[in-house]
Amino acid sequence: GSGDGGAHFSEPVTATHTANLGIYLFAPSVGIDGNKNIGITWQALTASLLYPGGLDVFFSQSSDGGKAFSPVINISDNIGQVETSPFIIVSRNGQMNVFWQDETGGNDQLLALAFGSGVSGPPQQVTPPSNLVVTPDQFGQITLSWTASPEATSYTIKRRSDSEPEFTTIAIGVTSNSFVDRHLQAGNAYYYSVIAVNANQESPASNAASAMPVGSIVLEDKIWLLPTAARSSGLSSSFFTTDVWISNASEAGVNLTLEFLQAGGQNNTEPPKSTLSLAAHETRSVPNILESLFGVQSNRFGPIRFTVPGVATDSVAIVSRTFTPSADEMPGTYGLAVEARDVTATGTSALGLVGLRQNAAFRSNVGIINLTDHTATHTLTLLNSAGATLATASGQLPAYAASQSSLINLFPSAANDSSNLDGLTVVVSSPDAALMAYATSVDNNTGDGSFVSGLPVQTGLPGGTHYVPVVTKVTGAFGTEWSSRLAAFNPGLETVTLFFSLHLPKSDNREVIPVQQALGPKATLVFSDVLEQLLHKASGYGALQVDWIASSGTAPIFSSQPATPAAGKTGTYGLQVDPVTLSHATRSLRITGVQQDDRFRTNIGFANPTNEVVSLSCVLRKPDGSTASAHSLTMQPLDYFQMGFNELFTLSSEPKSGEVMTVEVIASAPIFVYGSLIDNATQDPTYLPGQP
């Protein structure tokens, strides 16, 4: 013992005869669940490395910081089994789980993986937001602001009106301590509360606050950009064409202006223009858009800029499919989906293109678009999977210019036709301009491509949640064998901790135990088959939730591509599935580009990222906006499922060949939806994102 803070110690005396005990204890763990139950685990060994039972557990407590303890109580009754490496996990609903590695019969397979550190301590309590204030403005909007919760990684917004008896969730994944509610009726009173969320649990609700919107919403026109459209030849005798599908979900017609920004690095301040007018709820299909609207005959590609009236920005959805005929002269096509996105207020954040490949099987291209009216200076940095810089490239783009180059042309010192590179990330940055970036990953054997969106590097976020709407490892139609590739990039300078949870179909997934993975600074982690390699599942499918903690405050960036080997030949075909943050989940969504005929079939997927039971209605709109069918569904908390078109909708007559439709979804809480458009001849799928 020491009486002077550890400067000197008395001579040791024997307190326990360990030789008589013969047992060594290590790796103790303690946890407290949501009902204040205490759990304890340990590992016990003898000198001969046997795993004995028959140990007693004694309990005592102190309420004065350890100065005095209650009488010791034996609470165990000689428990003990043949196991090692025990640990405690407290799940999100406060339930305590104890897991171990079973050594019986020499079996050393790990039966469970830990969430968080996997050991000790009560679940972190999340402090509710405070001082919620709601303020109406003259534009018919209500702005919420509150004092942040120190433990929160995001916030959930709840609202009710005078006509609604209960609060409903209107937004999730909000990462700031303010929110603007725009979907309101002037003259109605609205009541709000805010809940803080972190990777473990939710806080109680904040104080409630109410306001009544005044005035009318006045919205400026928005600029949307379709990153690339083509009418041009490619390698291996491919020829790419782009079809565009546009839907208008509003009760009024909308007029759109379209401009073709030809790629090649030239100034596009005066691009060719065209216009389209859509009636209420109309879905317009524009086949071969560069030729049909802009007169392009061949060997041209580049972005299309849409000017969308402000009143229609919540009603218009734009998606495209760029495709090439099958290279083996069989019927059908291979293609990829590209979504138009709002770039009106795009900042100058660096952009990450994640999980690229340059090897014998795949090649990658990188596209850059200058969104500004002045010349943009840009730098591209090529990183390998370990985070090391392989090469850099720099250049300039004139106003509104676009360029696309292969990795080999951009980085000749680091990549060539003989390269065997995977897990590459390209970071695109500019000090003086807002940019958009994208990449295409192309199978060298089939010519099938997947689109990779350039996503901004976000800072100031200690944690958050991303969602991959679907991951899979299944046997599909016509002998296809699907598996999902997932890449994760850490742009920060400190390690990020990732927690992966698979949400199985038609299930309440609140008890799923996440799998933990560390991601080093600047590193890119690639799972070519995420269900097998990370989650140790031989088969299955579902939505993948990825919670993350970043001490540097820099959010990770993800990309995902399900694929299958091509039947009867070398190579693969597949599609991209865009991972999104929780804030992308909404209560009103559309899937545009739905087809069900002799050439294509469509599946529709739903993912519920909330802890609520969600009711939703699905309406199938014909091209003229009329209702073809409707269906109502209920989803359990954190539920997922996918349905075929004919499972979801019952039609009085079959859709016409080439008829392009839209599915409108209204949900009681924010959800994700998507479509998978499959070529019946090649079985190549195209991802149709659910758009608000």
Image (cartoon, rainbow, N blue to C red):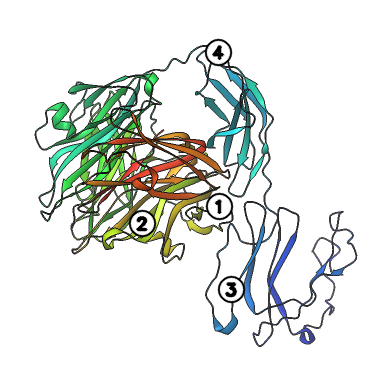
Q: Are marks 4 and 3 in contact (CB under 8 Å)?
A: no
Q: What residue type is labelled 4?
A: Val
Is residue 184 depicted above or below 320 in this figure?
Answer: above
Tag 1, which secondary structure? loop
The residue where tag 1 is placed is 508
The residue where tag 4 is placed is 214
Which of the two discs, 4 and 3, labels the residue nearer the N terminus? Answer: 3
Which of the two discs, 3 and 1, labels the residue nearer the N terminus? Answer: 3
| Residue at screen point 36% across, 19% down | 252
Q: Is residue 461 visible in the rendered structure shown here?
A: no
Question: Dot 4, how many residues are within 10 Å of its Cα: few (below 14), some (14-19), or many (20+)?
Answer: some
Q: Are marks 4 and 2 in contact (CB under 8 Å)?
A: no
Quarter of the image where one finds residue 321: top left
Quadrant showing the C terminus:
top left
The residue where tag 3 is placed is 101
Question: Dot 2, how many residues are within 10 Å of its Cα: few (below 14), some (14-19), or many (20+)?
Answer: many
The residue where tag 2 is placed is 485
Residue 230 point in image, percent of width and height: 18, 38
Label 1 to label 4, Cα distance in Å? 41 Å
Which of the two discs, 4 and 2, labels the residue nearer the N terminus? Answer: 4
Label 2 to label 1, Cα distance in Å? 25 Å
